Amino acid sequence: MDFQLSEEQEMLRKMVRDFAENEVEPTAAERDEEERFDRAIFDQMAALGLTGIPWPEEYGGIGSDYLSYCIAVEELSRVCASTGVTLSAHLSLASWPIYQYGNEAQKQNFLQRLAAGEALGAYALSEPGAGSDVVSMKTTAKKDGTDYILNGSKVWITNGGVADIYIVFAKTDADREHKGITAFIVEKGTEGFTFGKKEKKLGIRSSPTTELIFENCRVPAANVLGEEGEGFKIAMSTLDGGRNGIAAQALGIAQGALDAAAAYAKEREQFGKPIAANQGISFKLADMATEIEAARLLTYQAAWLESAGKSYGKASAMSKLFAGDAAMRITVEAVQIFGGYGYTKDYPVERYMRDAKITQIYEGTNEIQRLVIGRMVTK
Ligand code: CAA
Ligand code: FAD
C-alpha cells in the first residue's frame, strides 16, 4: 500500500494552491458578499488545464486521474468553496456522463468544448417536488419525429444560467418509473429553454444556483445521452463520482478553517499567553486535524478506486458523508476559536461555516448517503 502522491499529483497540488491563493482568494469574500460569479476565474482554470483534468488528450483533457481532480477541488475550496463546486459540477456532473455514456460525435463536440473550458457545464436532475426522490420527477420529453419536446422545470441548478451545456433528465415514459427517465444534452440558447429564479443563499454565494424552465423546448434525438430509458442509471452513476467531488470540497473547506484557526490561536493572547497554550483550544485543533486526515483518506481512496476501475459507489457515499459532517463540525469549532472576531466578516471562518452546510445537503443529503451505504451494507 502506497500513500505517497505521485510527482505529477504533487505538482498539480502546488500549481492549484498557487493559483487559488493568488487569483481566487483575494476576491472570495467580495464575490460572496456580492453573490457574484466570475467567469474570468473559470477561464483561468481552463488555461491551466483544470477544466479537463481526467479526460484523455484526444478529447481535450490533460489525461490525468480522478485523484488529481479531487486535489484541485480541495485546493480551490480551501480558499473559496464556490469556485470548488463550479469545477466539481463542471467535471464530474456535466463532463463525466458524456465521457462515460456519450457516442463519439457527442464526445468530439460537447466533451471537447467542456474539457477545453470553452463551455461550462451543469447537471439538472432536481425539481421542486423531486429532490431526494428523483423518480418522482415531472419534466417530460415527448418524441416528435427526429426531436424530443421538453416541458417542465428544474431547480437549484449549480452553474445554472452561466453554463453553456446542460445534462437534463426527463421522463420519456411516465408509466415505467425509473426506467422511463432519459438523459439529454441541452445547449444554452436552445429555443424554449430559459432561466427562472436565481436563489439567494446562506453559503457558496458566488456559485449561481438557478431554475431552468423548458417550454416546448425542441432537442434533437442526436442529443440523447445513452439510450432512451437509461437516464436514471446515468444520473445515479454520475452521482457516484460527483459525491466524491463534494467530499473534496468539504475537505478543502475544513482544511482552510483549520489553517486559519491554528494561525489565530498562536497569535491571539489572553491571560498573558497565546490561546493555543490552553489545552481546551489545542485539543480542539487536534480533533479538527484528525478528522481532516480521516476525511482525506476516505476521499483519496474513493478517487483511487475510480481511477483503478474498481467499484467506488459505496466509498464515495462514505467520503461525502464523513467529510461533509466533519467540515460542519470543524468550521463551527473554527468560529469558536476566533471568539467574537470569528462571528464577523473581518475573518473568513464565518464564510467557511456557511459554505460547509451545503456539503451535507447537495448531491444527496447525508441522510440519503446513509440510505445508500446502509442498502449496500445489508445487500
Ligand atoms: N448506479 C447504477 N444504477 C443504480 C445506482 C447507481 N449508483 N443506484 C441505483 N441504481 C439502479 C438500481 O440498481 C435499480 O435498478 P433495477 O431496477 O434495474 O434493479 C434502480 O436504479 C432503482 O434504484 P433504487 O431502487 O435504489 O431507486 P430509489 O428510487 O430507491 O432511489 C436514491 C435511490 C439513492 C434515494 C436516489 O433517488 C438518490 O440518490 N437520491 C438523491 C438525489 C441526489 O443525490 N440528487 C443530487 C442532485 S445533483 C446536485 O445536488 C449537484 C450539486 O450539488 C452540485
Ligand atoms: P428533500 O428531498 O425534500 O429532503 C428534505 C429532508 O428530508 C432532508 O433532510 C432529507 O435528508 C430528508 N429525507 C428525504 N427522504 C428521506 C429518506 N428516505 N430517509 C431519510 N431522510 C429523508 N440539484 C441538481 O440536480 N443539480 C444541481 O446542480 C444542484 N445544485 C444544488 C445547489 C444548491 C446550493 C442546493 C441547495 C441544491 C442543489 N441541488 C442540485 C439540489 C439538491 O441535490 C437537493 O436539494 C437535495 O438532493 C435534497 O433534495 P430536497 O432539497 O428536495 O430535500
Image (cartoon, rainbow, N blue to C red):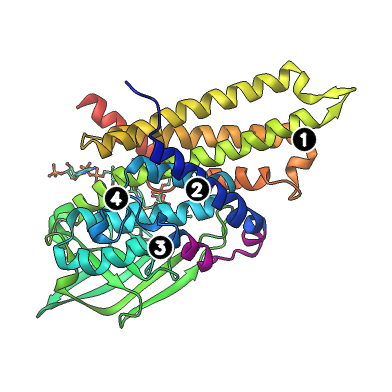
Q: CA distance from mark 3 to mark 1?
A: 37 Å
Residue 63 has which mark? 4
Farthest residue, direction left: 145
* First-in-chain label (2 vs 1): 2
- Residue 49 left/right relative to 216: right
In-front residue for pair 209/110? 110
* Label 3 Cα neighbours within 10 Å, binned few <14 / some 14-19 / many ≥20: many
Q: Position of residue 179 (x, y in %)?
A: 14, 54
The residue indicated by pointer 2 is 15
Q: CA distance from mark 1 to mark 4?
A: 45 Å
- Residue 256 left/right relative to 91: right
Secondary structure under the numbered disc 3 in the rendered image: strand
Please report the residue visible at 44 percent of the width from the left and 45 percent of the height from the top: 12
Q: Ligand 2 closer than 8 Å to the CB at disc 3?
A: yes
Nearest to viewer (mark 3 / mark 1)? 1
The residue indicated by pointer 1 is 339
Q: CA distance from mark 3 to mark 4?
A: 33 Å
Q: CA distance from mark 2 to mark 1?
A: 33 Å
Q: Quadrant of the C terminus?
A: top left
Q: Amino acid at mark 3?
A: Val
* First-in-chain label (3 vs 4): 4
Please report the residue visible at 15 percent of the width from the left and 55 percent of the height from the top: 230
Please report the residue visible at 32 percent of the width from the left and 59 percent of the height from the top: 94
The residue indicated by pointer 3 is 155
User: What secondary structure predominates along the stretch shown in magenta?
Assistant: helix
Total labels: the figure holds 4
Q: Amino acid at mark 1?
A: Gly
Q: Amino acid at mark 4?
A: Gly
Q: CA distance from mark 3 to mark 2?
A: 35 Å
Q: Amino acid at mark 2?
A: Met
Secondary structure under the numbered disc 1 in the rendered image: helix
